[in-house]
Amino acid sequence: IRHGGFWIGGTIIFVIVLMAIFAPLLTPYDPSVQSLSEGFVPPVWAEAGSWEHPLGTDNLGRDYFARLLYGARISLGLGLLTVIISGTIGTAMGITAGYWGGWPDMIINFFITVRLTLPVVLVALVVVALIGSSLWLLILVIGLLLWDRFAIVVRSATQQLAQREYITSARAIGSSTPRILFREILPNITGPLVVVTSIEIAHAILLEAALSFLGLGVQPPDVSWGLMVAEAKAQLLFRPWMIAIPGAALVLLIFAINLVGDALRDVTTPEGKA
């Protein structure tokens, strides 16, 4: 792909993924181990900072660099797992509505309309507040709330493909419906699916950060970038770096994902291919 945004965003994501995977090799500290005597150590660029804790420590003396590295694991993992759930649901619904039409299309359109009327953050807040907060519940809730864009895009793409001559020919020679769906239609909607996936990963990560900021997302001893921002909000005026570091990491990751998504959109459209 000869697209600058793709390579810039892809490089940033690749580096973040590598840092998350090799976190134990990059820092000797455990992100959940407390040392009250070393609380609020400033980062290395501050006057009292040191390379022992390059990004400083939080109020409980936990190494901030270690928390940033291990937090990337949960933020990235949550984004990927939620998209697997929502993508599977939305793709199945979109193909069903787009290929068969008729009453299946009407029913699925009704569910899409109902989902679009529900504010995602509010529904997630209510569910997590009623049932309780845990990482796996958070993944499930977000995954069950972000399927609508997949369904809309896949439905539209399937409707267009279902009218193509090669699909009509496949039906004429007696190809089974599963063969047509999995061998003819699904491979030809991969481009739009990849673009939607990139958008929804960023959406899921931001939603987790918002819920964690409100105290209903990832819970200690787990750590995510959203939780780091939430825990540091009391220090905004006194130690702004505690919010700036995980906040900048979130911005950089979302920016990189959006760059890759925009690049994929450009190269998968007919204009981009031309």
Image: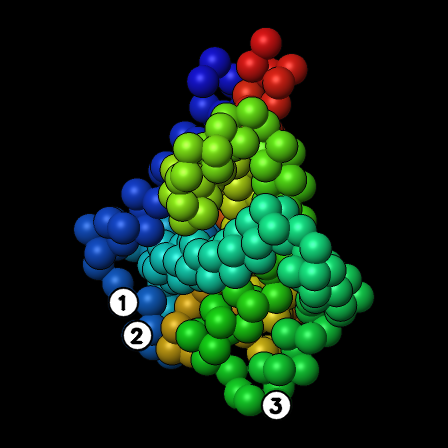
Whether 214 is drawn above or below 244: the answer is: below
Mark 1, residue position: 30
Residue farthest toward the right in the current orientation of the protein: 117
Q: Quadrant of the C terminus?
A: top right
Residues under numbered marks 1 and 3 in contact, where contact means CB atoms less than 8 Å apart:
no
Place of residue 273 in the rendered image (x, y in percent of width and height, measured from the top left): 56, 14
Whether 94 is drawn above or below 141: the answer is: above
Amino acid at pointer 1 = Asp
**Nearer-N-terminus badge (1/3):** 1
Label 1 and label 2: CA atoms lie apart by 5 Å
Characterize the local packing of mark 3: few (<14), some (14-19) or many (20 or more) Cα atoms within 10 angstroms.
few
Mark 2, residue position: 33
Q: Nearer the viewer, mark 2 or mark 3?
A: 3
Left or right? Give the position of 238 relative to 78: right
User: Which residue is at a point 56% across and 25% down the rendered structure image?
Assistant: 165
Residue 230: in sight, yes or no? no
**Nearer-N-terminus badge (2/3):** 2
Left or right? Give the position of 247 relative to 118: left
Residue 183: in sight, yes or no? yes
Residues under numbered marks 1 and 2 in contact, where contact means CB atoms less than 8 Å apart:
yes
User: Which residue is at a point 56% across and 68% down the rendered structure image?
Assistant: 144
Per the image, label 3 sits on a secondary structure element best described as: helix
Place of residue 8 in the rendered image (x, y in percent of width and height, measured from the top left): 48, 26
Residue 272 figure quarter: top right
